[in-house]
Image (cartoon, rainbow, N blue to C red):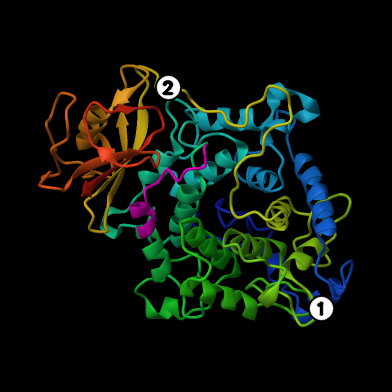
Amino acid sequence: MPRSSRSTRSPLSSRSSRPSLSRLALTLPAAAGALALMAPHAVATSTPAQIAAATGYGVGYLKSLQAADGSYAGPGLSNEWAFTAFAAAGTAVADVAPGGDQSKNARTVYRALLSSPGWPVSSTPPVTDFERAALNAYAAGIDPARVSASRNLIADIYGYWQSAEDGYFGPSASFNGTVFGALALAGAKTQTGAQRVPKAVLDRTVTRIRANQHNDGGWNFSKAEGDPAQLGAPSDIDMTGAAMAALCSSGVPATDPDIVQARTFLKNKMVAASGGFNSMFGANVNSNGWAVSGLNACGINPQTGDFVSTFGRTPVDFLIGLQFQPAGGFRYKPGDASPTAYGSIDALRAVAGGGFTSAPAQPVTAGVPRWVAQPSFTAGTTAKVALSVDTGTGSPKVCAVSFTPTGPTATLGEVLAAATGGATPAGCVTAVLPSSGTGTVTSLNGLANSGGSTWKASVDGSALTGATRGRVINVGDTVALRYGS
């Protein structure tokens, strides 16, 4: 997501997705914002019944955003982030269909969009296009690695690994690309709930996210690592929520010192009378939605402890106080006369208890599966495989391997051969022995099996076993090679 504009807000669309720059300049003083929020929940945290009601109203509003052709995503700004909110609220995207027409259900239409040769629209798309798609596809019940024979969103993200600054996805200056890379790769698990991306890859990205934490405990959209001035600059409420979620989704516990510092940063930004977080744009539904989603992802209850103000108000109270009930949409700021689509999506996801993606609900429509996925390679159709090579040094090589399968499955030998000349970024695999056959891989990138240390392979997070050239690789597999005992 380019930082070219701070004028609008939606996760991973451009910063041109906030309502308007002129409107954001009208930051409400904390006291005025508090007065606007004294109803309907004056001095008590929102009850489970109130949260359930707000969630139901919000789902109804998001359903009203669906176009007549069944779509949510489209050219320019789009509402596909509604899928993560639906999933958090327990609504299957496959059940969301205009007039009940299942041929136009939102999941089917979105999968067709992601599978089309014209997506993404740009010939040089930013990594955030693929990260956004992976998070929303997962929430919709589309396996992001198996969207189609030619579309593997996990491999697409791998292709933006920065070899010169390993751990970053996309240009490091656009730090949010790395945060949402971690959110997508850690959050979009396999259909059985397994972590498909190896720990070595996630750990390296976690290291980069930690290095970008500002002195005040939060994060911002741009890179701060190695820059004392940036590290000392004020943090952003939104990005702090996203970075917290990225760390926790990648396995960092809520008790970790960096999460504790971020939690303290958010606590110190609370407006006591409203429960909202006072962002650089004032207390607003989007920033608060992102912050609450970050707390949710870390298992930190935003309605207890640090997040109950001296007025008895919480960030969830703030969000629900901005909802039009029973219409269901959420205002961007107190006093606004109408809801915003993006604000409503961010708010519903947070109020429903979600992070930045959630596993899909089981559809209630008869005969509709929870997951859809490409079952096999299509001979003659170029495909991608996500590949990592880890020598145990803490700096794995990561790449997307493009090749043209000749049948419904491939072999590890075929993938490694293709990686020597068709990997992005280059250099993931430089040499492999033996160079043919189906036997054991004895040497990779000049590092040979020796004693108890050998090359092992894992697919989609499975246990590491001896790497053999003949190992079957299926469409969408995330392949990890590791050297060690």
For badge 2, the amino acid type reads Ser
Q: CA distance from mark 1 to mark 2?
A: 58 Å
Q: Is residue 312 above or below residue 402?
A: below
Nearer to me, 229 or 402 = 402
Number of marks in picture: 2
For label 2, the SS is loop
Q: Nearer the viewer, mark 1 or mark 2?
A: 2
Q: Which residues are magenta?
A: 192-203
Query: Is 294 situated left or right of 385 in this image?
Result: right
Residue at x-position 19% and y-position 25% = 438
Query: Is 116 situated left or right of 110 in this image?
Result: left
Q: Which residue is mark 2?
A: 376
Of all residues, the one furthest to the front in this rendering is 452
Q: Is residue 136 above or below residue 306?
A: above
For badge 1, the amino acid type reads Ala
Residue at x-position 24% and y-position 26% = 470
Q: Which residue is mark 1?
A: 32
Q: Is residue 322 visible?
A: no
Which is nearer the N-term, disc 1 or disc 2? Answer: 1
**Residue 133 on image: x %, y %:** 53, 42
**Residue 198 on image: x %, y %:** 36, 48
